[in-house]
Image (spheres, helix red, strand yellow):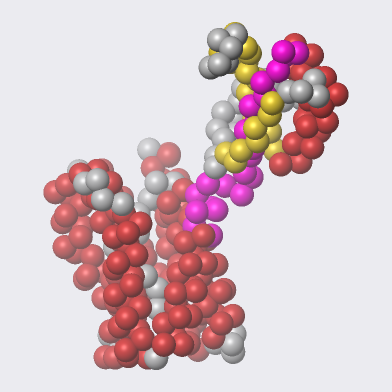
């Protein structure tokens, strides 16, 4: 129960941030957002209908689809997120009067950044604000389609409408806001503390392991491998480190075995002891 209440709190906060972003940065410059909210903003510009109310109405058939295809629990979370987002957009409509940024390009960049932050908070706690989120979940569960392509197609149509109604310049600025928002969302969901994974193949495994444990303080896992050509058994050192620890490990490996083979790659997210949980540093 406590976890569910905490989830609802973060979803509500994310929705409030997204709603404020729309009214502070996008609407004053006739910029759009993606998905259902983008269509609602177009209707607002043309007819003056409240954006939040339109978002709520447009989400009704999508919520029904969520209940039919994704189950009760997901639907309840989606209904909460949809209501909160719709309410947040209309409740923060007064912010359109402030027009904090005079330059449309700055408004697009800032709007994308702030809305991406809000969306990232929602997705990080496995929440949903409705709209394309529902379509994404259905596509992911039942079809082999790449939702990135589906979402791009929908937003591309919105961009065409924007270009036809408000001009190519505003459509391009909207695209910039979407791009920035999508990247910030990914950063928030994955976490800004990105790590690196390192694989080391060496005949001096013990020396390297001891150096890493002593000098860097990171846990190490030893994997068993075999050379494909020589069929000789080898040990592979696997370690996850922060960006600032890579140079130190490179130096330690070079000192212990100059002929060692080492691969450094990105880790989108690392969870467990030594990283997101207190306790041992063992990997």
The image quarter containing residue 64 is: bottom left
Q: In which quarter of the image is the C terminus?
A: top right
The image shows residue 184 at horizontal and vertical percentages of 53, 60
Residue 258 drawn above or below residue 49 = above
Instruction: Report the residue that reaches farthest toward the front.
Output: 229
Q: Horizontally, is 239 left or right of 105 in the view?
A: right
Which residue is most to the right? 255
- Left of 81 or right of it: where is 232? right
Q: Look at 56% across and 74% down and name the residue there.
A: 109
Q: What stretch is highlighted in magenta?
A: 184-205
Say left or right for 2 vs 229: left
- Residue at 38% x, 42% y is 4
Count of number-bearing discs? 0
Q: Which residue is drawn at 77% across and 18% down?
A: 208
Q: For residue 3: magenta?
A: no
* Quarter residue 98 falls in: bottom right
Seen from the viewer's position, the closer of residues 255 and 221 is 255
Comparing 105 with 62, the one in front is: 105
| Residue 11 in the image, given as x and y percentages of width and height | 42, 55
Q: Is 190 within the magenta?
A: yes
Give the image location of residue 147, x and y in percent: 31, 54
* Residue 91 showing in the rendered view: no
Q: In this view, does 140 lie above or below 51?
A: above
- The residue positioned 29% from the left and 75% from the top of the image is 157
Residue 262 rendering spot, x and y as whole percentages? 68, 29
């Amino acid at each position: 129960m406590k976890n569910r209440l905490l989830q609802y709190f973060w979803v509500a906060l994310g929705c409030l941030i997204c709603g404020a972003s729309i009214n502070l940065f996008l609407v004053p410059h006739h910029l759009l957002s993606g998905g259902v909210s983008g269509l609602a903003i177009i209707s607002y510009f043309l007819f003056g209908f409240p954006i939040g109310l339109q978002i709520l109405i447009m989400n009704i058939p999508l919520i029904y689809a969520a209940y039919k295809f994704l189950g009760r629990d997901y639907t309840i979370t989606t209904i909460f997120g949809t209501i909160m987002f719709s309410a947040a957009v209309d409740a923060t409509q007064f912010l359109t009067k402030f027009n904090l940024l005079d330059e449309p390009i700055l408004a697009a960049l800032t709007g994308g950044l702030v809305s991406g932050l809000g969306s990232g908070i929602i997705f990080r706690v496995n929440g949903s604000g409705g709209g394309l989120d529902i379509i994404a979940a259905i596509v992911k569960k039942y079809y082999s389609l790449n939702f990135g392509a589906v979402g791009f197609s929908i937003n591309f149509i919105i961009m065409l409408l924007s270009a036809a109604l408000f001009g190519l310049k505003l459509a391009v600025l909207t695209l910039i806001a979407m791009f920035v928002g999508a990247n910030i969302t990914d950063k928030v969901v994955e976490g800004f503390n990105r790590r690196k994974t390192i694989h080391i193949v060496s005949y001096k495994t013990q020396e390297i392991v001891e150096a890493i444990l002593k000098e860097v303080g990171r846990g190490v896992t030893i994997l068993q491998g075999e050379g494909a050509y020589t069929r000789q058994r080898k040990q592979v050192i696997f370690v996850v480190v922060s960006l600032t620890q890579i140079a130190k490990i490179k130096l330690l490996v070079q000192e212990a075995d100059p002929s060692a083979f080492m691969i450094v790659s990105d880790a989108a997210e690392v969870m467990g002891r030594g990283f997101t949980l207190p306790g041992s540093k063992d990997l």
